[in-house]
Image (tube, rainbow, N blue to C red):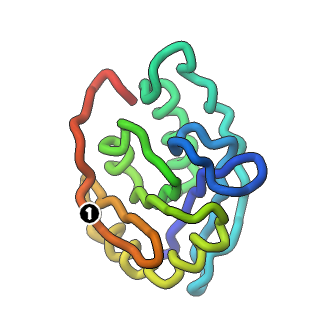
Amino acid sequence: MNLKFAFAVHKNGNFQNDHFGEADKYLIYEEIEGSLVLISEEVNSHKNDDESHKHGLKKKGNAISSMLIDKRVNVLVAKQFGRNIKIVSKHFIPVLISSDEPKEAIETLGKYIYWLKEEWGKGKDQFNLFTMKSGILKSAVKGEIDENLY
């Protein structure tokens, strides 16, 4: 099974210093024969949904999730996740990264992809959060679910 990843990036192609849903676009990578290969770039046409409300409301989160589910994405990679991480982790493996450039994230993800495949293979109703710096750390997603959000 090949995993698909969505990287939350700015227009310039570097990771956003903001929540996943605030990305200008998503770089979609697929793991093929041990390498992450860029297969598409998806403009985040939902970036400004719910802007008249507080971050994390249903319309925006559901629209982005639906788009990424349709693309068969398994893993979300970003510098930050918002309050909806508890709900996001029901559909995707969330990965927090510290690097600015996708190239650095690809190198680290490549070293630990077996952990992500193992996590996806468990078929859980909630995936663990992975935090990448020079290595990778797996932890439970914390926080309360507010049903009015996302």
User: Residue 139 appears at what percent x and percent y?
Assistant: 26, 63
**In the rendered image, which quarter is residue 46 located in?**
top right
Query: Image height check: is 132 above or below 16?
Result: below
Q: Is residue 99 left or right of residue 24?
A: left
Give percent across and percent down for residue 110: 53, 81
For the residue pair 85 and 121, the one nearer the viewer reads as: 85
Residue 23 locus on image (x, y percent):
62, 43
- Quarter of the rendering occupied by the C terminus: top left
**In the rendered view, does 107 fall on the left or right side of 149?**
right
- Residue 96 placement: quadrant: bottom left
The x, y position of residue 119, in whole percent, is: 32, 70
Q: Nearer the viewer, residue 81 or 76?
A: 81
With respect to residue 48, does 129 lie above or below? below
Amino acid tagged 1: Ser
Q: Residue at x 58, y 37 (%)?
A: 22
Please state the total of marks drawn on the protein image.
1
45 to the left or right of 120: right
- Name the element at disc 1: strand
Q: Report which residue position mark 1 lands on.
A: 139
- Label 1: how many residues lie within 10 Å, few (<14), some (14-19) or many (20+)? few
Q: Residue furthest top?
A: 52
Does residue 110 lie above or below 139 as drawn? Answer: below
Residue 72 or residue 136, whichever sits in front: 136
Q: State whether residue 127 is above or below residue 82.
A: below
Q: Residue at x 30, y 68 (%)?
A: 138
Write the residue at 37% across / 64% down. 130
Which image quadrant is residue 7 in?
bottom right
Residue drawn at (54%, 13%), measured in percent from left and top?
52
